[in-house]
Each structure stands twice: as structure tokens, then as C-alpha cells.
Image: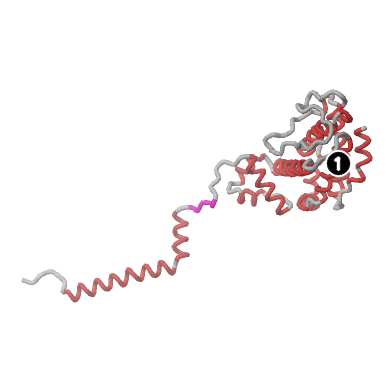
Amino acid sequence: MRQNVLEPSHAHLIHLAYRHHRHSRIARGRSGEDRETAVADDREPSAPVSTVRVLSHATAVHGGIRHFLSRGMLDMNMLARELAVSRATLYRTVRSRDALLGDVLISLGRRSVDLALAERYPAGVDGVIEVSRRFARRLQDAEALRWFAQQEPEAAHRILLAPHGCVHARAVDVQRELFVRIGGPEICGREPTPSSPHGSASGLTDRRLPRSLEAPVPRVPVAQGDPLADRAFLYIRVLESVLYGPMLAGRRPDFALAEPALRALLR
């Protein structure tokens, strides 16, 4: 009776053909790696290298500082990619481009003030003027800020100088605090200023302002009849006119132009 089986030679040929077909598919798969990668990408969407889901305000500001210092501007789409978040998440965290630019410039300004306070300085009017002079010197070397002011003068004016802008308001707060910490009785009078927890300063000092954005100098509204806040407001307006004004016009700031007026305000 004839058996319904393949002859050994036929089975061997079929086995060889199957192995050849299988090895050919593997070789084609290896040579077409890009094609297989594209198919895999269609199956499951690619994820960014960093999987940031929740963006804190401090992280956004720190990222904005790096971005601003390297480019002299703030591209929100590019910054969102750098932070590995969507553009909507970035705006939800910082509110607006102007608001983020304001926070970036405030943080950079506070760093400059801290560096100006790093060296010892005299108390009284001379100390306040010396810290302002050091700040102005650092501002002259601020390449990113100069580039921003030249490329976007309207935005720079709005963010740096607007009466209700966060940069101007914070500058007044910081200057008032400097009056208290450095000026002593020569500027603040004999009694400690009630709204400041530090009282008046005397002699040589190197106490610094806090650098953290989470611990800003308390707001002191100028409209409530605080003479020291009024003086800080005028002091900052004079500084702004000789520091930011020339920068917006493409010229270098000159602190010497402001010093006589600033001293007159402090006497």
C-alpha cells in the first residue's frame, strides 16, 4: 500500500526553501531598518526625551532665563520644546509672554543686585549710590538685554518701564529695601521703618537680598503715603531714564548722568 508521505529528498528541498525564504525576510528587515522604524512609529506615537507633565512656575522661569541669555529674546514655541511641554501648558503656567519676560528680567535684576551687594560698601547715601553704580555697570555688560531692547523696543518699554509693569514695581520694592538695609538713619531717619523687618542699617555691611523668586521683597504700595516708598519710586524713575532709556535708543547707559540727581533725592 502506497504511503501518503513525502519522499525524504522532497522534504529536504522544502525545508531548504523555507529556510532560504525566512533568512531573506530577516535580511530585508535589517537592511530596511528605517522602513521598519517608520512602521513602528505609525503603531505607537513617539514621546519626547523628557516626560515633564506638570510645569512649575519656577521651572518655566529658570528655563526662560537660559533661553533669554543665549538668544536675547524669548520664543515661546522653542522654549516649550526645550521644557518638553506643550505650548498650551507653558502659557497656562506663565500667563503670557510679557509676564514670563518680566519674571525673567526681575530674576536677572535680582542676581545683579546680589552681586552688587557681594562686596562691602559704606552705609548711608554713599553705600546706596555705590550699589546702584555696580548695578549699572553690570547692566552695561548685559548683552542679551541690549539685544532684546534693540530688537523689540516696544515690548522692552512695556515690560521694563510701564507704571503697572512687574519689573518697575519690583524695582521700587527692592530699592526701598536697600534704603532700609544700607541707608540707615541718613536716609530712613532715626527710627526703624515699621514695614521693614530689618530696621535701619549702620556701619559697613554686606547683607544681601534674597535671590529666590519664591521669596520676593514684600510689596509696599506707593499710594499709601509711605515717604520712603515715594523716594524709592523717584529714585528708580531717575535710574530707568539713564539706564533703560539709552539702551532703547541703542546707546550705552551712563550712570554718571544720574548720580547728581540720585544724591539730591537722598539728602
Q: Quadrant of residue 238?
A: top right
Q: Position of residue 199 (x, y in %)?
A: 79, 27
- In the current view of this chain or complex, which residue is farthest to the front? 203
Q: In this view of the protein, can residue 159 be seen by the observer?
A: no
Q: Is residue 261 above or below residue 143?
A: above
Dot 1: element: helix
Residue ID at (78%, 50%): 142
Range of magenta residues:
45-49
Question: Dividing the picture into quarters, in which one does residue 127 lie?
Answer: top right
Residue drawn at the location 82% of the way across and 24% of the way down: 192
Q: Amino acid at mark 1?
A: Glu
What is the x, y in percent for residue 219? 76, 30
**Quick one: which residue is furthest to the bottom in this view?**
9
Q: Residue at x 48, y 52 (%)?
A: 45
Look at mark 1 in the image and give the residue it sits on: 130
Callout 1: 10 Å neighbours few (<14), some, many (20+)? some
Q: Residue at x 72, y 42 (%)?
A: 107
- Residue 237 falls within the magenta-colored stretch: no
Residue 156, placed above or below residue 179: below
- Give the farthest residue toward the left: 1
Q: Is residue 255 above or below residue 4?
A: above
Q: Quadrant of the C terminus?
A: top right
Image position, residue 249 (x, y; %):
86, 50
Please count the marks in the image. 1
Judged left or right of residue 204, residue 90 is left
Q: Is residue 86 left or right of residue 74?
A: left
Q: Coloring scheme of the render? A: secondary structure
Q: Main secondary structure of the magenta part?
A: loop
In the picture, the quarter occupied by the N terminus is bottom left
Q: Is residue 189 left or right of residue 196?
A: right
Relative image position of residue 264 (x, y in whole percent): 94, 35
